[in-house]
Structures are given as structure tokens and as C-alpha cells.
Amino acid sequence: MITVPVDSLSEEQAKTELERLAMLIAEHDRLYYLEDRPEISDAEYDELRLRNQAIEKRFPYLIREDSPSLRVGAPLLGPFKKVKHRKPMLSLDNGFEDQDVYDFYDRTRRFLGLSADTPIEIVAEPKIDGLSATLDYQEGHFVLGATRGDGIEGEDISANLKTIKDIPSSIEIGDFPRGTEIRGEVYMRHEDFMAMNAEREAQHLPLFANPRNAAAGSVRQLDPKITAGRPLKFFAYACDDYAPFHVTTHWEFLEKLKNAGFVVNPMARLCENVEEALAYYRELEAQRADLPYDIDGIVYKINRIDWQNRLSSSTRAPRWALAHKFPAQKAQTYLQDILIQVGRTGALTPVAILEPVTVGGVVVSRASLHNEDEIARKDIRIGDTVVIQRAGDVIPQIVGVVLEKRPKDSEPFEFPKICPVCGSHAIRLPGEVAKKCIGGLICTAQAALRLRHFVSRDAFDIEGFGSKQVEAFYKEGLIRSPQDIFTLEERDRESLTPLRLREGWGTLSAQNLFKAIEARRKIPLHRFIYALGIPQVGQATAKLLARHYVSYGVWKAAMIAAKDPDSEAYANLISIDGIGPSVSEDLAAFFDEPHNLKVLDDLLKEVTVLDEEPLQMGSSPLANKTIVFTGTLQHMTRPEAKVRAELLGAKVSSSVSAKTDYVVLGADAGSKAKTAKELGVTILTEDDWLKMIG
Ligand code: IVH
């Protein structure tokens, strides 16, 4: 794909690009978090996120409601109970070059208003490549342990975490606080991982791809006895709130953790300045291959807790920390074949089949090739020797071809012009990177995947109806359209080959499936909207729509009317915070398609869509208000003031208009004060402002 540099993007291009990146990143998040089968390397993934960030920085007004920068991780999956974290479990901002670390220091200095010679101590810790967990201790006893999940809610995996020896079941109370969440990383050492895989191989069990997946798989076992047999370890490195620890620095906090019986990484180091931090990074980079476990970088954390508190966090990551990533690890191997997969939207995705090779301690046999252009640009051919790279644990990418080793008779790869699943033409629309099968519903791959989406956990959530069953039912013609799911039992009763007599099914499993389907005849509006699989309408957008329109009938009528961009319905739709013209277009296009309306009508004969709770107004006095800061503030810098206001739900703007709710006047305020007075906007002094934010 040709990527236009961020600086040369037009506004229109930026909009399209942000849309593309949001979808792409969401898809990769899903593959990584939910399906444990990432298709791109960490480095590539980071590149997508960085590009998204850079575009958002240049065009802040184009930031999407479903922007990946506002979200951490992926939604939840699995049979574990959900638990809400007391404080969100955030991600970390990434840096790759030394300059990113210098910038981090500069940003911190500017934010806190520190002079150039004020020393800033940081704690540097290895960034463990495992999975994060939070442990809740009450009165010194471990009572609840959870995964990160989507950052807000995780899964209760207490029983499994209790089997890990590094996690103390009780801790000395003494100075140690009551009620606190200790956070850290569950991981597996290389030698334990290899011994475990060797044992599994002997028992003909499927092997884990790498230590991280092995740890993640082990911790999510339904039977804690299985987890107990897995060699899991835990490093503690954070908490939900420092206050009860009576410490002033992160370094002291780590000391307290150790004294309380946690394992703290002995390689953590206190660095006086940026040079020491970078020297530490180099030292560990050199040791990386010899360490007993995987690390993918260094985490720098501002040592002073009062500074951490002031710097606070964005919705995604704390401003007081930075993950400095190591470069990817590389290897050479032979490209045996290129497979073409077809997705829900019909996109043809090429996958490289490789002769298995070890990269950074992990055996790799597949790599993502992204799309047609990527193969052509790198001139990748079957039979080539290729350089692959992997960062972290994911399926790697192909960096390039070793031309000296290319066989004489090799030929350029010809990307298929027809869909390998249904034989329809595959075409590329202007502006799109992927070739798409035009087979639509006749293409099994697409239709079955759409149905799979329809019954998936965040949509209709029909238990026991996995991809295998959906695909099999689709192929046999039992289910072609969503409403068929709900008439399955009735048809089954009259069938000569009822489900219970089919291979793999019995009376009980058939009954269970029918029961699970029956249980979903009533569905909340937001799930219903999400289930339809309208392009760009993910869970977040579905919720916005559902809360806005409240009932299915109102929503449907509004969407049909919104086809006309001059209509009131259209104006109303785009007035929803987070819904822009591009999503509106996709919604209108969906409702403009007679086939879709028929599906909806048929479906509504079978299911009842429940009304949604209307949107609650926030309770903060600043919720949804627009605020402008002008002049020099005495008690905090401008960036800090902005962050505080945003945390309370306000929008910060740089210019005063009739829509402004408050103007905060610092010293030497200029023309904005005058404009505010003229427009009758409420003016606050800095003291008023401080009182307002408490
Ligand atoms: S601190 C709010 N320290 O990296 C920040 N994270 O990319 C809390 N990780 O979700 C995280 N080693 O799973 C921190 N020494 C370390 C870490 C570490 C690994 C992971 C953690 C986090 C992810 C973010």
C-alpha cells in the first residue's frame, strides 16, 4: 500500500485514513486479544497506532468516537465472571528511538513547569511480555484476582491466580495497607515453557506458540487444577492507588512490595537522568537473548508520586510512564506457499506459509502478507528465501526477500482474480487496499462469517453456536439468513433428519441449542444494532445510537429518513457526539438496500428488541461544557489545566464563541477576555476554577 506521509494528507484523506486505521486496529485487537491468533507483528501494529496518533495530532477535530487512541485492549470473552477494576488498568505509550525518550522528559518538564536543570528521577523496569493481572487484598488477604480485559472490566480468575507461588495469599498488615490492588505480570520462563511443550508433544496435545500464549492460556483454564500444574510466575510492579502505602516515590513502593512478600524484578533500576535511563536500555538490550524470560522493552516511570499524580493519565495511558520498545528480532526462512483467506466483508487476505524457523526463541511458520500491493511492492514469490521479523509474540511479518537465493525459474506471484471460496470475481474498488469477493451472500466464507458475527458474544450471544456449527448449518442450507436461526427448532421438528440424529449431536445437545436460541428472542437495542454488522458500527457506535433513539421503531424510521442529507433526521443523526458523516453514510446505505430491510422485517417477526435506557447526563458541573483558558495560570500549567477539565467531562477550546460556557482568566489575559464579556460568557477567575475542580 502506498502511504501518504502524515504531513501531506489533505483533510479528506486524513478522514478516510483515520476511518481505515480505526477498523484495522480494532480487527487486529480482536485477533490478538480474543482469538489469540494475531496476524501482524507488534512492530507493525505499533506503526498503525503511531500513524493514527500522528494524524489525530494534526487533525484533532477529526478524532473519531471509536478512535483506537481512546481504547485499551479488546472486549472480553469467556465464561469467567466480569469484575470492574477500582481504577482502570491502562496501557502504556510506546517509544522506539532515543529521541522518543528525550521527548518524554521534555513533555514531563513542560507539563509540570520544571526548569531545565531540575533533575527528574525515573525507575526503569524490564517490560515483561506476559499478561497483566490485578490482585485485590482485603485486610491482608488475597480475595480477588482479575485479568486486564478491556481495561475497565476484567475477568475473575482468582482461583487460578491462587495457584501461583509468587503471589502471596496473605501479606503482613503492619504498615501495609488494608484494601489495595497490586498489579503485575503473569509470565512463563523459557525453560519451563519448553519443558511443558515437550511434555505436551509427547501426549499429542497441541503446542503453545510461545511463552506469552502459554501463560495466557494457562491462566484462563476453567479448572484451577490444570493451572496449578503450569509453571507460572508473577512480577509485581504497580498498584491502583499509592496513597495507603505512605511512600513518596515508586522506588520506595517497590521496596514495600518486596517486604510484603511479592516478587519484584531485581533488575529494576533507579536512574537519575535521561542518559542513565538510555544506558540501562542498551545494557538490557544486549542481555535480552540470555534472559530467562521474554521482555519486549523497558518501562520508564517518573519516580516522584506527587508528579505522577499531577501528570495523571489519558483514557489510554498514564502520562508518567513510557514503554521504550526493543527492535524486532529477525531470521531467514523458505516461503513454501501463499494462502488466500476470505473475511466477513469479502476481503481476500494473503498469508505466507513458511518453513518453520526459530525467531527470538519462538517457532514461526506463518506470516501475514497484508494485501496484493504488499506482495507486489516487496516482489515476494513462492520459493523465495525471506527475512522475517517478530516483535513480541505475534505472527511475524516478511521484511524482504534474499534475492541471491531466488531460484532461477521463479515467477512473480499472481494474485487471484476470483474468490478461492465461491469462484465469484474479486475486484478492488478505488481507494481500497483489499481485493474483495463480490459474491456477497452467495460466498460461503462471507455469509457464514456474517452469521457468526450475528450470534457472537457481544451480539446475540447464542451459547453453543460457534463458528463450526454456523458454517455447517450454512453449508447445508439450514440457515441462510439471521431469521432462520429462530425458526430452526420448528423446522427441525418436521425434518426427516432432525439435529439430534446428526453426527456430533444428540438429544441433549440439540435441546440445549434450541434453548439457547429461545433465550435470545428478547434483545437490547444496542446488541441488536451491533449484530447487524453494518460497516463502521461497532459496539461503541451501536450503544450511542441505541441510547439516542431508545426504541427500535424510532431508530429504524430515523435511519430511513436520514438518507436525505437535507432532512431533520440526518441533522439529528450527526448531532450525536461521536457520529460523523462517514458513519451516517454507511447507516443510510444499509437502510437503502431493500434486501436488508427484508432481513430486518423477517427478523422482527421472530425477536423482540428491548428499549434502551436513555442517556444520563454526567453529574460533574463541567460535564459537556466548553471551556477556554486564557492568560497565565498561577497554580498549574495550561496542559495540566486542560487535562483536569477533560477528566471532568469538559471540552477545552482555544477560541471563545457563543458556544463557550466558561472562560478562565489567568494573569495578563488578552482579547479573549473582551470577547467573552461581549458574548456574555461566564468568566471565572483562577480561584473560581480551582474551587470548581475541587
Ligand atoms: S506499568 C499504568 N510496568 O505492559 C501502567 N507494565 O503495554 C501500568 N508490562 O499492560 C503498567 N512490564 O501488562 C508496567 N514493568 C512493567 C511492565 C508492564 C510489562 C505490561 C503490562 C501493561 C503493558 C502495557
Image: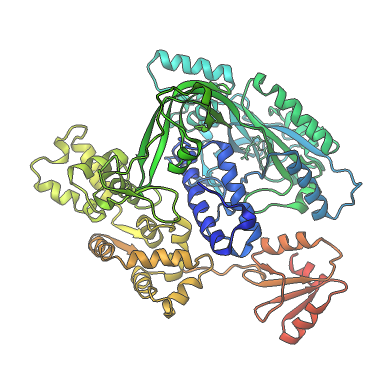
Q: Report the residue at 74% width, 29% height from top.
A: 258
Which residue appears farthest toward the right when viewing the image? 117
Q: Residue at x 36, y 39 (%)?
A: 341
Q: Is residue 551 left or right of residue 99?
A: left
Answer with the quarter of the image where residue 678 lies.
bottom right
Q: Residue furthest front?
A: 408
572 shown above or below 118: below
Q: Is residue 154 above or below residue 110?
A: above
> Closer to the camera, 70 or 596?
596
- Quadrant of image for the C terminus: bottom right
Residue 666 visible to an observer of this rendering: yes
Q: Is residue 338 left or right of residue 89?
A: left
Q: Is residue 143 in view? A: no
- Residue 283 image position (x, y, % from top left): 76, 26
- Pinpoint residue 664: horizontal percent, then vertical percent: 78, 73
Q: Residue furthest top?
A: 202
Name which quarter of the figure residue 511 lies in: top left
Percent from the top left, x then y, of residue 302? 78, 43
Front residue of this view, candidates 437 and 192: 437
Quadrant where ligand 1 appears: top right
State how many labels appear. 0
Identify the residue at image location x=83%, y=33%. 276
Q: Is residue 357 above or below residue 273?
A: above
Residue 392's spot in the image, x, y percent?
58, 31
Is 615 displayed left or right of 498 in the figure? right
Q: Is residue 75 left or right of residue 631?
A: left
**Residue plotted at (92% across, 46% down):** 117
Judging from the image, the colouring scheme is rainbow
> Which residue is at the front of the view, 461 or 676?
676
